Image (cartoon, helix red, strand yellow):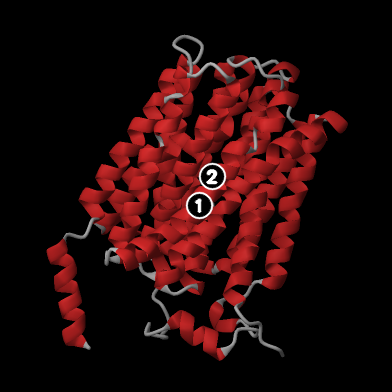
């Protein structure tokens, strides 16, 4: 059978497709929020409970989903979870109250919990260390591409047919992805279209012996994990806010109708795509140009993202709705740059058999932070307004940068010692 040149990039494209659909399904609710609050007659506070139902189940399930994926493998694991989340998304069409909608959101969270851990595991398994930040950056663009596609697609489906049809169509897309994945994906060791040259390039000097079983204990014992988990706890509220609250904010506080919003809603997520890609390439740039270690080059990119997160904090100072969306766009760029590099740090820090588990635990921390902030918005948005809460997002990311640098940053002496040891070993 013919070999496929650059097969790892086709595998990456397959994961990107799954991530795109994942975030279309996830963001369908946020796009339809102005409609659903009227159709199902629920309040802003009840809407925050619906969002929190997804966030809680997603956060608690992420380490479990990551561990299952490490245990049973990417092919079967991703298939089962994608099938689950697609079915759950379609079931939203049958919700008759905020309580039933919250139940379907919880099921969606269980299914979607494996998507990011699976993507990070794919990047670790299919790419050499120097390309992993690029791979995580590209597959993570799927999250913002999906969030960018969701507003026009979902609004069109809703206005052309109904909000119920919007959920059914977007859920069916995920079911299709699960089938496509099962048919096309194979692990690196078993892929019959992978050339010997590319396999050698990916594996490099790494041992080819069978990997031990994944270990939650080993993951939680590393101080680096706690640095990454704390950073995700602080930074994830930004992405949850962009995904679930921008539509409601622009309609209720900025006076846009849902059709006007659909014309501009893609901008923050286009900027987020650019942030994902830039984050992937900025790390190798810092490593080569300034002779940084791989870990420090990741942290330098995270620093750029954290500083750019000042954008959302300035939204209260602008009058124009378009200016507000542009500041959200700067925030989307910033968040996805640092988010992709946090995923890359996981690939640098953990053994291959533990990568999905570590990503899942860190994701749980992130979504717990996002959940708490969502509930906070639901409680305070109608009293103090949204803008002071957006300022908090800017502050959180600066604190996250400091945490990552203190816990994971490699000081010069450590780097020199490691390099000297490697030289002696060689």
| Label 1 secondary element | helix
Provide residue 168's location: percent of width, then percent of height. Answer: 79, 41
The label on residue 245 is: none
Q: Are marks 2 and 1 in contact (CB under 8 Å)?
A: yes
Q: Nearer the viewer, residue 19 or 322?
A: 322
Query: Looking at the image, which residue is at 68% across and 27% down?
Result: 261
In the displayed structure, does residue 246 sit left or right of residue 347?
A: right
In the displayed structure, does residue 87 sit left or right of residue 249?
A: right
Q: Can you name the residue that lies furthest to the right here? A: 161
Provide residue 322's location: percent of width, then percent of height. Answer: 60, 25
Q: Nearer the viewer, residue 64 or 406?
A: 406
Query: Looking at the image, which residue is at 62% across and 30% down?
Result: 102
Q: Toward which corner of the image does residue 216 lie, by quadrant?
A: bottom left
Provide residue 144's location: percent of width, then percent of height. Answer: 58, 46
Quadrant, the C terminus: bottom left
Q: Residues within 10 Å of mark 2 (few under 14, many from 20)?
A: many
The label on residue 272 is: 2
Query: Looking at the image, which residue is at 47% across and 83% down?
Result: 201
Res. 186 in view: yes
* Vertical order, 405 against 101 (above or below): below
Res. 161 in view: no
Q: Residues within 10 Å of mark 1 (few under 14, many from 20)?
A: many
In the displayed structure, does residue 148 sit left or right of residue 327?
A: right
Q: Nearer the viewer, residue 388 or 38?
A: 388
Provide residue 255's location: percent of width, then percent of height. Answer: 64, 15
* Vertical order, 65 against 126 (above or below): above
Quadrant, the N terminus: bottom right
The label on residue 276 is: 1
| Real-space Cα separation, disc 2 to disc 1, in angstroms | 6 Å
Q: Can you name the residue that lies furthest to the top here? A: 383
Q: How many marks?
A: 2
């Amino acid at each position: 059978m013919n070999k496929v040149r650059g097969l790892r990039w086709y595998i990456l494209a397959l994961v990107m497709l799954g991530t795109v659909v994942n975030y279309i399904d996830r963001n369908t609710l946020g796009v339809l929020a102005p409609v659903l609050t009227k159709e199902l007659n629920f309040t802003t506070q009840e809407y925050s409970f619906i969002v929190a139902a997804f966030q809680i189940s997603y956060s608690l399930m992420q380490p479990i989903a990551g561990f299952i994926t490490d245990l049973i493998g990417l092919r079967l694991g991703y298939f089962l979870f994608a099938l689950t989340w697609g079915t759950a998304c379609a079931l939203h069409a049958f919700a008759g109250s905020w309580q039933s909608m919250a139940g379907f959101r919880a099921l969606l969270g269980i299914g979607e919990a494996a998507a990011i851990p699976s993507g990070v595991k794919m990047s670790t398994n299919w790419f050499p260390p120097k390309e992993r930040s690029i791979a995580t950056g590209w597959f993570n663009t799927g999250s913002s591409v999906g969030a960018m596609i969701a507003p026009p697609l979902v609004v069109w489906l809703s206005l052309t047919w109904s909000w119920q049809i919007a959920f059914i169509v977007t859920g069916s897309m995920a079911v299709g992805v699960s089938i496509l994945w099962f048919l096309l994906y194979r692990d690196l060791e078993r892929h019959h279209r992978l050339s010997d040259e590319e396999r050698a390039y990916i594996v490099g000097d790494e041992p080819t012996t069978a990997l031990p079983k994944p270990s939650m204990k080993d993951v939680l014992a590393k101080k680096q994990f706690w640095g990454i988990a704390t950073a995700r706890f602080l930074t994830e509220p930004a992405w949850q806010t962009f995904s679930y609250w921008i539509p409601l904010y622009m309609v209720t506080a900025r006076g846009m109708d849902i059709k006007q919003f659909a014309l501009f809603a893609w901008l923050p997520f286009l900027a987020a795509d650019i942030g994902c890609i830039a984050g992937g390439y900025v790390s190798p740039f810092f490593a080569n140009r300034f002779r940084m270690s791989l870990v420090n080059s990741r942290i330098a990119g995270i620093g750029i993202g954290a500083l750019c997160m000042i954008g959302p904090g300035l939204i209260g100072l602008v009058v124009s709705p378009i200016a507000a969306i542009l500041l959200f766009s700067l925030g989307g760029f910033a968040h996805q740059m640092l988010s992709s590099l946090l995923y890359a740090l996981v690939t640098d820090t953990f053994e291959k058999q533990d990568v999905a588990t570590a990503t899942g635990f860190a994701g749980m921390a992130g979504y717990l932070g996002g959940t708490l902030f969502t509930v906070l918005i639901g409680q305070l948005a109608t009293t103090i307004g949204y803008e002071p809460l957006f300022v908090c997002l800017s502050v959180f990311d600066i604190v996250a940068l400091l945490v990552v640098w203190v816990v994971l940053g490699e000081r010069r002496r450590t780097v020199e010692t490691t390099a000297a040891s490697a030289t002696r070993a060689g």
